[in-house]
Every structure is written in structure tokens, then in C-alpha cells.
Amino acid sequence: MAAKREKTVLQLGGGTTATTTAKVHPLVIFNICDCYVRRPDQAERVIGTLLGSVLPDGTVDVRNSYAVPHTESSDEVALDIDYHHNMLTSHQKVNPKEFIVGWYSTGFGVSGGSALIHEFYSREVANPIHLTVDTTFRNGEPSIKAFVSVNLSLGGQPLAAQFQEVPAELRLSEAERVGYELLKSTMADKIPSDMEGMESTLERLLALIDDISLYVDDVVKQRVAPNNEVGRFLVEAVSSLPKIDAPAFDKLVNDSLQDQLLLLYLSSITRTQLSVAEKLNTAAQIL
């Protein structure tokens, strides 16, 4: 698809009255960053399709994505539509509940060609969202913004495509946060192992417990004003913990740790056996 730049693009910041919100899973950010690193040398940005679903409350749940080859110049944008449809068919064979919810581009905001691309995705799905991701991590965080588009017209004549920013939130579980922190770093020697990831998570948990303890002490000693909402949250968190004495808790943790160590040991043996079998197979073919 090739189209000329004919529409003016208006971008509005936060504070819009739009009710749409976007929930982005970390896999989407990983995919976008990976595609950006692998982009052609002449490409300034990466464009792709967002997959997911719309929740009953109207939230757009973005769970997956894939890049779409494109070329753009000062006056036109061209997308590989056949590639887009083939990738969509392949994805839906694996995840039939994921549908097109919008599209993404790398960068800080909408550009002149965004209106043309958004117009194409508007024919693919009603009310698509446009997600922009800053893959340079200039502020130590990926700047993620979501937009919806409204066409402005006067007397039946289209004047501009108005992009309104809507709330966007990154959903992270504790396990995913370890990989996300690694992605934020500019350089990493290696990907952390399971044990290193667990250690990092426990260190973060201990730091949070220390912060809570300091806050409770400050409230008790009347150094800070109590917050009823925080107090209710702490009570609910403490009451949800099972009542286990210290020896039983230590045994439970040690048993779980031993299970994980056993899995690591078995996986290491499996990798060694596969490597030996591959070398024996290669040697047998040579002989």
C-alpha cells in the first residue's frame, strides 16, 4: 500500500476526554525493541501491528505484536499489506482469541505519515489505537504513549486527523520485571539465570519490606500523618499470609529451593546429553 501525505496531523497531549485506555504487556515492548534493533540500515523507525482484545470495560489489552515492512519518504508511505495479512493469519492459528487492536511505531509521537497508516488500520478494525514507543530509553524508561484518532471535517471536507493521547499502562509481573530491568540497561554481560532472577526479586522484596517497616515506625512515633488507605492495604496484605511457624516456613522454602536446583541440574544433564548425541551423530556421518 502506498499513499500520499494529504492529511494534516494534530496531536493533543494528556487531559483528553477520551475514555479508551491501553494495557500493554511486556512481550509487546520486547518485540518492538527487537524489531528496532534488526531494522534495515536505511529505516528510521519500525511500524507494526498490535494484537490483543478489548475488555468489557473498554480497555484495550495489547498482548502481542509483529513488525510490518514499510518504506516511507517525504511525501508517501508504503506498507507490505500481503506480509501483514500472512502474519495475522499465522498468529491467529496459534492464538485465535487475539485480534488486531491497532498499530505501533517507534519514536516519540505521531508524524505526518501516521494519519495514512492509521487510516489503513481503521479499515482493518474499528477504533484502532496507535502506540508509540521510545526504544532509545533516553530517560531510563521506554516512553510509551497511546493515541486514538478523530477525523475533523468542515462542510463535508476532511481537514485533519486529530490524535488524542489516552492513558497507557505497562503490565508487569514480578517474573517479567526481571527481564524488563535487564532490557532497560544499556549493556549486559549475560541474561540472568533462574537463581539470579530469584535473588534479584527477593532483594527487591526485602527493600519493600524495609520501606514498609520504616513507614509503620514513623506513623507509630507520629513523625508522619497516618494514611487510612495504606493502613487498610497493609492489614489486608498481612491477613492474607498463611499462619506458619518459623521452622515450617523454613522447611517449605528449602524444599522449594531444592526442587528448583534439581530442575536446573536435570536440565543441565539434558543439554549435555543432547550435545554428546549431536557430536556422536556428526562423527558417525563422517566415518
Image (cartoon, grey):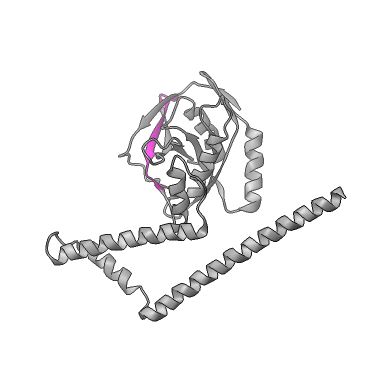
Query: Residue sitting at 44 percent across and 78 percent down?
Result: 251
Residue 154 shown in magenta: yes
Can residue 210 be seen in this snapshot? Answer: yes
**What secondary structure predominates along the stretch shown in magenta?**
strand
Reply yes or no: does residue 253 show up in magenta: no
Compared across the picture, whether 6 is left or right of 206 comes to: right
- Give percent across and percent down for residue 87: 64, 42
**Quick check: 46 left or right of 151?**
right
Residue 214: image x %, image y %?
A: 22, 62
**Where, by quadrant of the figure, is residue 184 drawn?**
top left
**252 or 135: which is nearer to us?**
252
Residue extending furthest left? 222
Q: How many marks?
A: 0
Spot occupied by residue 191 in the image (x, y as percentages of width and height): 52, 50
Please give the name of the residue rendered at 45% of the width and 76% of the height, measured from the top-left corner.
Answer: 252
Residue 58 lies, with reference to residue 103, above or below; the image says: below
Q: Quadrant of the N terminus?
A: top right
Q: Is residue 172 left or right of residue 65?
A: left
Q: In this picture, is 13 found above or below 243?
A: above
Seen in the image, is 5 located left or right of residue 88? left
Task: Give the extent of the magenta segment.
Answer: 153-169
Whether residue 229 is visible to the viewer of this picture, yes or no, is no
Residues 220 and 86: in front is 220
